[in-house]
Amino acid sequence: MSERVHDPIARLAVLLSRLPGVGEKTAQRLAFHILESPKEYARELSQALLALEHDVRLCSRCCNLTAQEPCALCRDPLRDGRLLCVVETVPDLLAIERTREFRGRYHVLHGALSPLDGVGPDRLKIKELLARLSHDGARTESDAAGASSEKIEEIILATDPTVEGEATALYLSRLLKPLGLRITRIAQGLPMGGDLEYADQVTLARAMSGRREL
Amino acid sequence: MLEGPNGQGKTNFLEACYLACTLRPLRAQRLAELVNFGADAARVTAQFEMRGGDRAVEIEIAQGRRVARLDGKPLRDPDELFRELAVVAFTPDDLSLVRAGPDLRRRLLDRAVQNRHPAQLSDARDYLRALKSRNELLRQGAPDALREAFDGPLAQVGARIRLRREEILRELSPFAERAFSQVARGEATLALSYQVAGGDLQPIVGESESALSARLAQGLSARLSRDRLRGFTSVGPHADDLSISLGEKPARAFASQGQARAIVLAFKIGEIENLRAQQGRAPLLLLDDVSSELDPERNAFLMRSLAALAGQVLLTTTDADHLVGALRDARGEAGDVRLYQVRAGRIQAG
Ligand SMILES: Nc1ncnc2c1ncn2[C@@H]1O[C@H](COP(=O)(O)OP(=O)(O)OP(=O)(O)O)[C@@H](O)[C@H]1O
Ligand SMILES: [Mg+2]
Ligand SMILES: [Zn+2]
């Protein structure tokens, strides 16, 4: 039993090695690096990690990750509230933001329909999307600080060009059709089986501007 | 030419070559089977002479996943590699495919397609995923709206896969049928065609991908109640077949064992000749001890065809003297043959 006392360095290394792309050796090197850095660094790092746990939540409007409510993108008065871009994940949202091609607002589904992984519509933020649209846009979007009354006119489905992403786009397009909005899908410049997050910026920007009606 | 007694690692070597060219296993069902027993990972490195000069391909398999590098850089888009490489493999397993179930014939067709259209590989993966998803939804009795969402990509990718299969068959059939008439002199003529599951889904000349996709989607809906009962999807390229007939009779039922082998031989030679006609160069050919499975006359035909092929051939045998003799008989000299000995997993020149 006495052997079970954790060596803090080994403990940290084990935790770090769970990160994607970090092997055991790298994890150990990182752990020693933190140990040898000025004391404030370890403290700041641990506070930043705790803040993730305490402060980051889903934006009640768009389901983006945020420390403020609503998130900065939902509050920004300069964004075009008539355009709503639906993405699978927060990294996808960030990838589209990097292209600077899109100035509307977002909705994050937090996944895609995937029967093989047991993900059905109720596991995605589809209810939240519908609520957003059925409130006529006006009420929900207008109470954002500084944002004037906004009515969503076009939904851009920017799910990944994978089987699951395509199916999710198709599912949403049929679900949303009765609302009478314009529904578009980003162009297929992206190869199927690809991943929005890793698409290069030019390809993604082109896919965004070349979107087609669904 | 790789020579060695049984169980020394000859086929393993060809397996590695095939993996380096296609990123897929040749015989193995799963990538994990390629890793040495007791080891964590497998690595294959290969040097290819390509149009742009020598290029190094490196593939590592660990935990059932594959990482490929081209000239040391991660290969993000496998097409980059496939555009440059065509490979045709011929193994004793192939010899049974005429009379076996349709899986092997579809694989034969898909491997031929892949040499012409590298994207077939990722499309096939997408198709399988869409198919499994739909079957899962059928079994769960999921709402129509959800199932239909997967019918879309299934029909879309399915149409693409099917049109490419039909195209490759149009391309290579004349070559294969001619090769067969040469190898089986005087016997019935060979005819190859694409056999579609579902009377309403028969080929229409000149049909576009989107039109076929719409037709496939309709075909899926039309069979919904039956598919629901059975828990799987009954139409689509996964249910189609390569139809082979000899003198208008289905070869699957009526071909003799010797004829069945001659058909496979003719198909492979047809595939090679088509690639040469289309791409202006011969594919890399991997031959796994096929000679020992063929009678002397068919073997001589294979050797003559190899001799006429201006490309690289890697072949394995348990009896090099015999094979070199057969090659010499075929063209009067053995040509540029380099012999390697395979013993207990090691390969040595000699
Ligand atoms: N993953 C693996 N790890 C270690 N050994 C393996 C693995 N898979 C197969 N083997 C073994 O490798 C040996 C060589 O197999 P291989 O099929 O290459 O032989 P071969 O030289 O082609 O023989 P034959 O002439 O009988 O076809 C066999 O004994 C086989 O059991
Ligand atoms: Mg073997
Ligand atoms: Zn928000």
Image (spheres, rainbow, N blue to C red):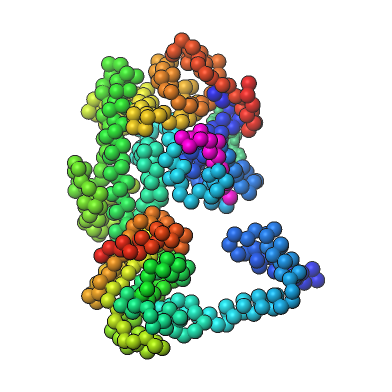
Image side of residue B22 versus residue B141, left or right: right
Q: Is residue B165 magenta?
A: no
- Residue furthest toward the right? A2
In front of the other: A146 or B168: A146
In front of the other: B202 or A203: A203
Dividing the image into 4 quarters, which one contains the N terminus of chain A?
bottom right
Identify the image quadrant of residue A26.
bottom right
Position of residue B62 measured from the top left corner of the image (x, y, whole percent)? 58, 50
Q: How many marks?
A: 0
Residue drawn at the location 53% of the way across and 19% of the way down: B337
Q: Is residue A136 above or below residue A106?
A: below
Magenta range is: B47-62
Q: Is residue B149 above or below residue B307?
A: below
Residue drawn at the location 53% of the way across and 35% of the way down: B54
Position of residue A143 measured from the top left corner of the image (x, y, whole percent)? 37, 89
- Does residue B333 appear in the picture of this structure? yes
Dividing the image into 4 quarters, which one contains the C terminus of chain A?
bottom left
Image side of residue B169 versus residue A13, left or right: left
What is the magenta segment's predominant secondary structure? strand
- Does residue A126 appear in the picture of this structure? no
Image side of residue B247 versus residue A120, left or right: left
Identify the image quadrant of residue B350.
top right
Image side of residue A129 versus residue B49, left or right: left
Residue drawn at the location 43% of the way across and 23% of the way down: B310
Position of residue B170 measured from the top left corner of the image (x, y, whole percent)? 27, 34
Residue drawn at the location 25% of the way across and 74% of the way down: A181
